[in-house]
Image (cartoon, rainbow, N blue to C red):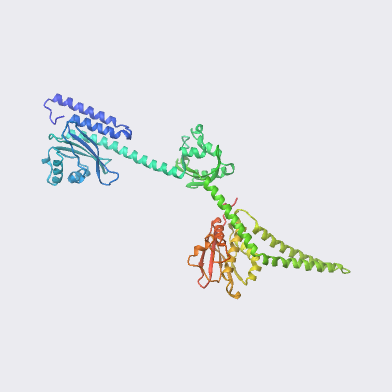
């Protein structure tokens, strides 16, 4: 299309044909899929170059991999035109780059039009045999430049009338919108791909529920984990199917947790539960869910979440807990075995009292008349001694029984006193004195009495053994309890030789400094405290010896059924 037409009628027809061409080009980019954008831009470049008799067109785009660098991505040159070269170095055109990044349309009809400050650009264009150029920045919403659309002639110079520049700006904007949409979709696809890959790697199934439209979405992994059949994909059938297959013993708890999120009591719910898969049987599921949007009234509009099959890890956890309980039980049996002598002494005292009193009662009853009042007093002593022996046996049976950790409200001071009573004779035999400072009125903790007894017994024996080489009069164990914030703290201090440099090694299984030791006592103590959601640690005392502390959380009403 010439810059000036000698025939006004022909010029009008030519302008109308060009307008039709531009309208046709623009219409093709309406709702154009991202995968077709490159093809349509190349076709538009060809049609524009052929209509305007332009030798070549190039579209530059900002590189994703190299910040600040523009690369030629769309190129067209006339089949029978002169050979074309495109500079790959954007620094060849510093003046053009500044103008375009400022949002200005830049170009020239002849190289002589370029200002003095564009001398470097002029030489670059001359080297590429360019006679005329029109460059239009691709700007998204007035933001940073994402590219440049260039038209070039090599065979002859040409003018760029304002009307033509305006039309080319419209074309550039069409290209800009298409490329920006393509980039956005590519970024979204990349993010979705990463999320999908992450979800697959983590074994996570995703879902979303629209409570207003009564519809739901779930990915394939959700369907696989829950065993949702193809006939339950409409509306909220997935949700109903999921609820129906939660284990009956867990269903109410799960629904209550979900309701807390729906009513705004919590931001999200995090729950583990058993699920009855229709073909795979019982499995364990870890479920995270939250509310995405609400109405002004607070009613839930949309909720989403993720689920993960944790059956394998849950079974491993159960097996580990069972092994830990077995190990703790064996350690208790071993510990009580070491107490055999002192326990026999403990039982001999009440049994001896019972025997001597029974013999005395026989003699009194043989008298004429029998001394009934004295016999009654003797029988009372027998009953008291029998109860004492029974209490010793009950404590032994309790310590010897198996069982998982069962948390109940427990008074820690009572546990310590029970252990001291059980170990009293053994400690006396070792020449150990126990000094207790148990804080009165401590709140109950959430604990398992048997496991806590084992914890305290292990720490006391550990302290006694640490002082085995010392003179009997210097073997002292200090017991203390106190309330520390929302936890009950107990401390066991000895006056022995202190701690090794690496204190944590003491709590490692099979680490021991005693030739006959198994190295399990403190490791079991740590596992017991961990099972009670507490912590156990050791530190040297400022004067002498070592201190072992453990803290356990105060019992809350929600800890128990």
Q: Is residue 350 visible?
A: yes
- Judged left or right of residue 385, residue 254 is left
- Judged left or right of residue 273, residue 402 is right
Residue 82 at x, y percent in the picture = 15, 34
- Vertical placement of residue 494 versus 86, above or below: below
Q: Which residue is more in the foreground, 253 or 154?
A: 154
- Judged left or right of residue 210, residue 472 is right
Give the residue drawn at x 67%, y 64%. 340
Q: Which residue is more in the foreground, 368 or 93?
A: 93
> Farthest residue in the right direction?
368
Residue 465 at x, y percent in the picture = 58, 68
Residue 234 at x, y percent in the picture = 48, 32
Give the residue drawn at x 75%, y 68%. 352
Q: Which residue is more in the foreground, 172 or 312?
A: 312
Quadrant of the image occupied by residue 53: top left
- Vertical placement of residue 258 versus 44, above or below: below
For the image, the number of numbered tags is 0
Q: Is residue 410 visible?
A: no
Residue 515 at x, y percent in the picture = 56, 66
Q: Which of the image's four quarters has the N terminus?
A: top left
> Farthest residue in the top direction?
9
């Amino acid at each position: 299309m010439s810059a000036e037409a000698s025939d006004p009628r022909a010029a009008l027809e030519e302008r109308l044909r060009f307008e039709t061409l531009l309208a046709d080009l623009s219409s093709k980019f309406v709702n154009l899929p991202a995968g077709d954008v490159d093809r349509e831009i190349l076709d538009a470049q060809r049609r524009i170059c052929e209509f305007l008799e332009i030798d070549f067109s190039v579209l530059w785009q900002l590189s994703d991999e190299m910040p600040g660098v523009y690369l030629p991505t769309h190129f067209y040159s006339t089949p029978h035109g002169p050979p074309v070269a495109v500079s790959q170095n954007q620094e060849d055109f510093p003046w053009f780059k500044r103008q375009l990044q400022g949002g200005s349309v830049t170009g020239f009809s002849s190289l002589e039009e370029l200002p003095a400050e564009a001398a470097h650009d002029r030489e670059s264009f001359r080297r590429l045999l360019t006679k005329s150029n029109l460059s239009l920045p691709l700007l998204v919403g007035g933001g940073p430049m994402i590219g440049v659309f260039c038209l070039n002639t090599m065979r002859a110079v040409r003018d760029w009338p304002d009307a033509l520049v305006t039309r080319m700006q419209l074309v550039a904007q069409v290209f800009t919108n298409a490329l920006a949409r393509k980039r956005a979709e590519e970024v979204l696809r990349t993010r979705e791909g990463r999320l999908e890959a992450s979800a697959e790697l983590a074994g996570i199934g995703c879902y979303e529920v629209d409570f207003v439209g009564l519809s739901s979405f779930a990915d394939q992994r959700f369907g696989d984990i829950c065993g949702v059949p193809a006939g339950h994909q409409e509306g909220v059938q997935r949700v109903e199917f999921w609820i129906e297959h939660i284990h009956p013993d867990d269903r109410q708890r799960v629904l209550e947790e979900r309701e807390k999120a729906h009513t705004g009591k919590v931001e999200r719910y995090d729950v583990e539960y058993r699920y009855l898969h229709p073909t795979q049987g019982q499995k364990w599921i870890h479920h995270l869910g939250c509310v995405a949007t609400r109405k002004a009234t607070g009613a839930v509009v949309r909720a989403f979440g993720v689920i993960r099959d944790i059956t394998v890890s849950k079974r491993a956890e159960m097996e580990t807990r069972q092994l830990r309980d077995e190990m703790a039980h064996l350690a208790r049996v071993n510990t009580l075995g070491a107490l055999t002598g002192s326990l026999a002494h403990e039982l001999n005292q009440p049994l001896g009292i019972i025997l001597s009193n029974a013999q005395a009662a026989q003699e009194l009853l043989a008298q004429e008349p029998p001394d009934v009042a004295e016999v009654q007093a003797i029988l009372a002593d027998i009953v008291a001694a029998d109860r004492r022996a029974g209490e010793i046996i009950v404590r032994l049976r309790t310590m010897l029984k198996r069982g998982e950790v069962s948390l109940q409200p427990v008074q820690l001071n009572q546990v310590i006193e029970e252990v001291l009573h059980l170990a009293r004779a053994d400690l006396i035999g070792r020449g150990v004195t126990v000094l207790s400072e148990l804080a009165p009125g401590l709140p109950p903790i959430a604990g398992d009495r048997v496991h806590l007894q084992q914890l305290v017994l292990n720490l006391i024996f550990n302290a006694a053994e640490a002082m085995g080489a010392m003179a009997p009069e210097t073997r002292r164990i200090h017991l203390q309890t106190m309330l520390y914030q929302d936890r009950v703290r107990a401390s066991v201090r000895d006056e022995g030789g202190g701690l090794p440099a690496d204190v944590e090694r003491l709590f490692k299984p099979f680490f021991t400094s005693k030739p006959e030791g198994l190295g399990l006592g403190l490791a079991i103590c740590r596992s017991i405290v961990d099972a009670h959601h507490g912590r156990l640690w050791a530190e040297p005392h400022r004067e002498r010896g070592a201190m072992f502390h453990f803290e356990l959380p105060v019992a809350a009403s929600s800890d128990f059924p």
